[in-house]
Amino acid sequence: MAFAITQNCCSDASCVSVCPVNCIHPTPDEPDFGRTETLYVDPATCIDCGACADACPVDAIAPTWLLRPDQQVFAQVNADWFTRPDAPAAPLWDAPRFPTVDLSAIGRLEVAIVGTGPAAVYAAQSTLRATEARVTFLERLATPGGLARWGVAPDHPGTRRVLAHTDAVLHHPRVTLRTGVEVGRDVTPAELSRRYDAVLYATGAAGDRALDVPGDDLPGSVSAREVVHWYTGHPEAVPVDLSRVRRVVVVGTGNVALDVARMLSSDPDRLAGTATSPAALAALRTSGLREVLVVGRRGPGEAACSSSELRALTHLPGVRTVLSGTAPDDAPPGSKAELFAALDRYDDDLAGPPAAGRRIVFAFGRSTRALVGQDRVRGVVLGSSGGDVTVPAELVVRAIGHRGTQLPGLPFDAESGRVPHEAGRVVGAPAGTYVVGWAKRGPSGGIGANRPDAEETVGSLLADAAAGVIGRPSRRR
């Protein structure tokens, strides 16, 4: 028997570092790392020790014999990854790696980290492990956690377990947390640079991409971020009115789009024991919502969601997950397109009102032409090779990505929506100014992608400290 990695893998590779037989791939040193939907356990090599399950910050690893019925497919998914022609042939170990800078040359640093999301926490962890630094977190809100708290769906309790990792770092004896502090309002980047040896900005991407079509500004047109903040209980969340909503159109096919579709379609009783906000639960209990239409511009094979999140939709109690239009007839075995092709067909006319019952409908090859309505959204014009169709809908959710916003006093590239940097060093800012996470690389990658990102930035910080660019020399030299 073996262990298997399941749906909510964060790919931060904590499991890789503790595995005694190197059975988890791809590793951070392999080309596929960061490109696969999850990591995978080789059942032929696994010795059932459970070290990976203990180390996993999001509770995504379990023995195959304890997988729930809706998870049992992952035993085969893990095994299948190692049947590929280019799969690792044997549990080979990479050469050991050692610090490239003289850590003994680094004195005690005073480090500020702006933000408390996953990127900030990984950066703090790397800094605390390598140095005797004192770290001060500056958080704009009253409650820390960032995207891990306000961006993870409440019905994914395993993924939300990463907050325990956040709490552990925040309670480190060399860490201070200051909440209710907004950089740009309460303190400027220039003031932080004078007070601290190093300042790391982990401010994420707080903006939203627009549809840029007529009617996008009508009431009833909202961003996925707004909906996610509403059902996670973000203190600045704007209420989402579902009282007269029968159909929701979600534009975009990424995992956030699927989260929104699943949460809006779920039975409130299913969500009652989760971190779903009371306001969202109350709205869902009185909602007459029948249908969530998820619209993709390209085909099923190019959908941005992960296969595991799509599988989860098919197990949603009381909700049918269906496909509008013709299914792909050339879907490669085991592909995402094959999963879509296996869905039941939606034969109703999209131009008509939604029928009774609850369903999530996928429609591919359709672009959003316009949102229509006088005082608020009443429908969406979708275009395809077969012509345009106006779909009646009372709510449209834009799930087409986030975008970085400028922090006053910090360099910002408006075209890319990122802070300009070289290996995490902010370009155009005083020495000792660094950036991590989405503010650094743009809004891409999940929680685990922040770990190597933070390690790169902290590597630059350590090199600067050892070279005397920041901080004071160590007395141990």
Image (spheres, rainbow, N blue to C red):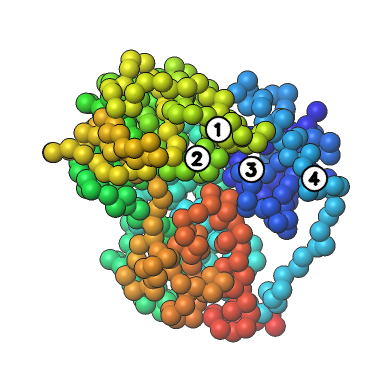
**Type of amino acid at the residue the image marks with label 4:** Pro
Q: Nearer the viewer, mark 4 or mark 3?
A: 4
Determine contact: label 3, label 1, CB under 8 Å.
no
Q: Nearer the viewer, mark 1 or mark 4?
A: 1
Residue nearer the viewer, 63 or 54: 63
Determine contact: label 2, label 1, CB under 8 Å.
yes
Q: Is residue 3 visible?
A: yes
Q: Which of the numbered marks, if any, corresponds to residue 85?
A: 4
Residue 426 vertical position relative to residue 252 in the rendered view, above or below: below
Residue nearer the viewer, 437 or 199: 437
Q: Is residue 176 visible?
A: no
The quarter of the displayed image where residue 388 is located: top left
Task: Give residue 143's position: percent from left, percent from top.
Answer: 38, 48
Pointer 1 residue:
328
Q: Which of the numbered marks, if any, corresponds to residue 299?
A: 2
**Type of amino acid at the residue the image marks with label 1:** Pro
